[in-house]
Image (tube, rainbow, N blue to C red):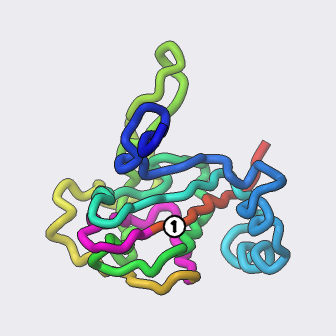
Amino acid sequence: MGSHCFGVSAAVVDTIGHGLHNDAASTVHALCSQPALASMLSRFVAEPVVCMSKAILKPASKGAKVPAHADDQYFYTSPASGVTLWFALDDATEANGCIEVLPASHLAYKLGQRFACGGDAGKARWAPPPPVDEPWRVDFPAKCDELAWEALPVRAGAMIAMDRRLLHRSGANKSGESRRALTLHVCVFVF
């Protein structure tokens, strides 16, 4: 198979798995089972449950730009709950596409369209945002580039915790270094 994965050039594979934490033999499962992680998460979320995990890859000089979004657009809960934990596996710099956040955006904006599964023949699609009973929130900004983004460069091994409504993005990897990360999406488990 060489430099290809599932018939696609490895250079375009940017995300692996959405349930890496489910494999009891995996390193990700071992991380999620650590009492220290559970203790830390309980500061953010009552009765935390890791609902999704994935590896994010930005190959040297090829990793793509990720547009502005809030994780609740892809992994929505009602009521809104949870936090995203982003673990740097490599140093994350502005040159290799570190995370950029729009400070306090999780308090200011309504959730934009959300990615939904099901519906028409079970196909995934973009759905209208859920109604919000928070009159202070304004619409999701259409032109995000002009806003006051803050880059968050971190060393390998660092963790960034983000409210799942926080607007964030990352630039393309223009460096000769890879930028890999592990994300855990944590929420309150509701039956």
- Residue beneath label 1, please? 181
Crowding at label 1, few (<14), some or many (≥20) Cα neighbours within 10 Å? many
Q: Nearer the viewer, residue 90 or 65?
A: 90
| Residue visible at 42% across and 58% down in the picture | 70
The percent coordinates of residue 146 (x first, y second) are: 14, 69
Magenta span: 158-179
| Residue visible at 40% across and 69% down in the picture | 178
> Is residue 18 magenta-colored?
no
Q: Is residue 129 left or right of residue 86?
A: left
| Residue visible at 47% across and 16% down in the picture | 120
- Amino acid at the residue labelled 1: Ala
Image label count: 1
Q: Is residue 16 left or right of residue 111?
A: right
Residue 25 sits in which quadrant?
Answer: bottom right
Q: Residue furthest front?
A: 2
The percent coordinates of residue 122 (x first, y second) are: 53, 19
| Residue visible at 45% across and 81% down in the picture | 91
